[in-house]
Image: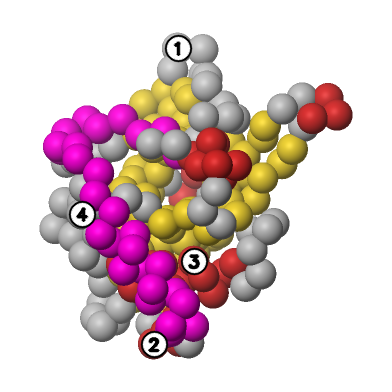
């Protein structure tokens, strides 16, 4: 997933990735410890339009999840970016999107950890288009995102290829529950499942 920092520093460290890898292998039932709440979002009906491009080819929307949790969804050049837990007034809003054309699904899974009052992560399915003609491929990627805490630290923490990984939803929940809360945006590296060049090639940071 391509990323542009509007603010923050950037060094990549793999410590969290290694820890999550071990966690996923050893604790397959850990996803049961947290709670999920689901939301279906319609940008036009449910969200406030913040801005639109001159020709209508780009737009930004302010939406709200459970408990009025703000998130901003941006669209431009047939690509989308979503920043959770940050409103349009906060400085750490970022742009993250896949290189190829893409679109997130309407349904958002909000993950809650120890505190049932505030989500720590979201899981959302993205459709990513690569190639053309006989080489065209429609990827189905589960994107795990950290929800900003007190307006700080909203970013992607993991990617799961739903077409190639069995129990993709369970894997995505484990990634969310194990690492999203303490994930250091722009320092820790996201988790990739499977971790190969094919997946990294369309979601490279």
- In primary-sequence order, the first of circles 2 and 3 is 2
- Which residue does the numbered mark 2 point to in the structure image? 33
Query: Quick check: is 11 in the magenta stretch?
Result: yes
At x 14% / y 37%, what residue is drawn? 9
At x 53% / y 36%, what residue is drawn? 201
Task: Tell me where the magenta segment starts and ends, as one range.
Answer: 1-28
- Is residue 151 found left or right of 83 in the rendered image? left
Separation of residues labelled 2 and 3 (CA atoms) = 14 Å
Examine the rendered structure and indicate whether residue 64 appears above or below residue 136.
below
- Which residue does the numbered mark 3 point to in the structure image? 172
- Which residue does the numbered mark 1 point to in the structure image? 54
Separation of residues labelled 4 and 3 (CA atoms) = 18 Å
Considering the numbered disc 1 on the image, is that residue within a helix, a strand or a loop?
A: loop
At x 43% / y 84%, what residue is drawn? 27
Residue in front for this viewpoint, 18 or 114: 18
Residue in front for this viewpoint, 144 or 14: 14
Separation of residues labelled 1 and 2 (CA atoms) = 47 Å
The quadrant of the image that shows the N terminus is: top left
Considering the numbered disc 4 on the image, is that residue within a helix, a strand or a loop?
A: loop
* Residue 184 marker: 4
- In primary-sequence order, the first of circles 4 and 1 is 1
- In primary-sequence order, the first of circles 4 and 2 is 2
- Is residue 110 found left or right of 118 in the rendered image? right
Please state the horizontal and vertical placement of residue 165, each as a whole percent of the image.
64, 63
Separation of residues labelled 4 and 2 (CA atoms) = 22 Å
Examine the rendered structure and indicate whether residue 126 appears above or below residue 3.
below
């Amino acid at each position: 997933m391509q990323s542009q920092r509007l603010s923050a520093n950037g060094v990549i460290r793999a410590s969290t990735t290694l820890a999550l890898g071990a966690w996923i292998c050893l604790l397959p039932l850990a996803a049961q410890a947290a709670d999920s709440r689901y939301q279906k979002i319609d940008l036009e009906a449910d969200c406030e339009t913040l801005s639109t491009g001159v020709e209508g080819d780009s737009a930004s929307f302010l939406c709200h999840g459970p408990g009025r949790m703000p998130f901003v969804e941006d669209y431009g050049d047939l690509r989308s970016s979503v920043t959770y837990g940050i409103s349009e007034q906060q400085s750490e809003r970022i742009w993250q999107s896949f290189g190829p054309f893409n679109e997130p699904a309407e349904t958002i899974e909000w993950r809650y950890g120890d505190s049932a009052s505030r989500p720590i992560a979201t899981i959302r399915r993205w459709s990513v288009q690569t190639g053309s003609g006989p080489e065209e491929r429609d990827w189905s990627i589960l994107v795990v995102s950290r929800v900003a805490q007190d307006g700080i630290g909203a970013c992607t923490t993991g990617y799961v290829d739903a077409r190639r990984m069995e129990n993709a939803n369970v894997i995505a929940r484990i990634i969310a529950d194990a690492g999203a809360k303490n994930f250091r945006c722009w320092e820790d590296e996201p988790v990739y499942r499977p971790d190969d060049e094919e997946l990294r090639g369309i979601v490279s940071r």
